[in-house]
Image (cartoon, rainbow, N blue to C red):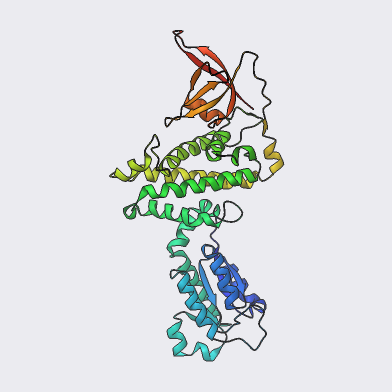
Amino acid sequence: MSKKYNVLWIDDQHEDLSAVHKTATDYDIQLWPFKSMSGGCGELETNLSKYDAVLLDAKFFENETDVPGTEDTWWVHKTKDRIRDLDNTIAYFVLTGQATTYASPEFNNAFPHVFNKGVDEDEDELFKMLIDACENRELTKLKYKYFNPFEMCTGAYLGKKQFNRVLKLVRDIENPEKIEVAQDMLNPMRKILEALFDKLNEIGLIPDEVRKEEGGINGSSIFLSGLNSSYVYQAELIHPMVAENIYRLLNITQDGSHDNGKKLRADEYLSLSKNHNLYKSTVYLLLDILEYMKDFLDDNPDKNLNQEKWELRKFTAPIDSISGKVIEIQNSGWGVFEADDKTKTIKIPDYKMEKHILKLDQIIKVTTKPSPDGTRTYIDEIFTE
């Protein structure tokens, strides 16, 4: 993959500077032009993670709709302050045709990298320095090293809200000696998975009935694995290895992000651990999922085609089935079924609870079978409406 750096450019005359655009293209730089401080800084504030450097004219408008004659060098100083307040790691350069400004010691003290517009040697040196600044910026290096996971943190996929979550996780595995409270990152990982399920629901791969009901995060994972018995699967939804990775990661993040005595006690384990191996492995697992899902979403955008991969099963319970409801869900994940006539209660194994996504007080029908020694009754099949 060729690196193409994104540089925000503020110059009120950018529309007339096709030569600068061409030079940028030669250096594999994409310029994103604006005429004013408010236009450029507003874009930077909205999409800060998109940009790798900033290029400024020495004189431009305050607002995009300002008229010629209102340009002022005051706005470049204000712009510099806003850039530094946003992110002091992003480099900024000045390319100006104002000879007096270019020669001003005061201006050069405020802006250490000033280049003369229209001078080939200056422009070449500018773009070389732009490339160098981008290549040596930590955030930019991480964005290219983990390109697909960070691409997933855009509006076309999971949304910009996920960017800082992924960035924190990536920085932890890049600098494990700086990891502070690993268990606190389980909830952000769960949030990223939730955003992924929302996207898969949006493109029709996960049904509304699964994603939007209570317990939809676990239900979404089970559905992607092809294990929801309420549906007939006409095709494999995602690679089974990825479905398994999602299930395993969700088990850890769900357990660790709820301080209510979950069976794995993940939060406790991570807080007591003398190493970060488990935490790092969960981050790598998430990155692998995001890597796969970037290409998957690109290749499977059609909602109608995705919805053809599954259909709701029409259940007909056997005549000898027993009607009742789930009256208890235990901490172990097991449930308890009680018949309508209250003549019997039978335990429901945790894997059947997960498979059917059963909830407290849910009405179901079951068939039963005796235990091998004939002393107990087991639930054989479960039928949900």
User: Quadrant location of the C terminus?
Assistant: top right
Q: Position of residue 333 (x, y in %)?
A: 45, 30
Q: Residue furthest left?
A: 274
Q: Position of residue 4 (x, y in %)?
A: 55, 62
Q: In front here: 52 or 223?
A: 223
| 184 shown above or below 237 | below
Q: Which residue is at 53% across, 31% downward?
A: 360
Q: In front here: 119 or 140?
A: 140
Residue 125 seen from this side: no
Quarter of the view holding residue 375? top left
Q: Is residue 301 left or right of residue 356?
A: right
Residue 235 seen from this side: yes
Q: Is residue 129 left or right of residue 323?
A: left
Q: Which residue is at 38% across, 38% downward?
A: 261
Q: Position of residue 220 (x, y in %)?
A: 56, 38
| 294 shown above or below 9 | above
Q: Position of residue 264 (x, y in %)?
A: 38, 35
Q: Which residue is at 54% across, 63% downward?
A: 50
| 302 shown above or below 79 | above
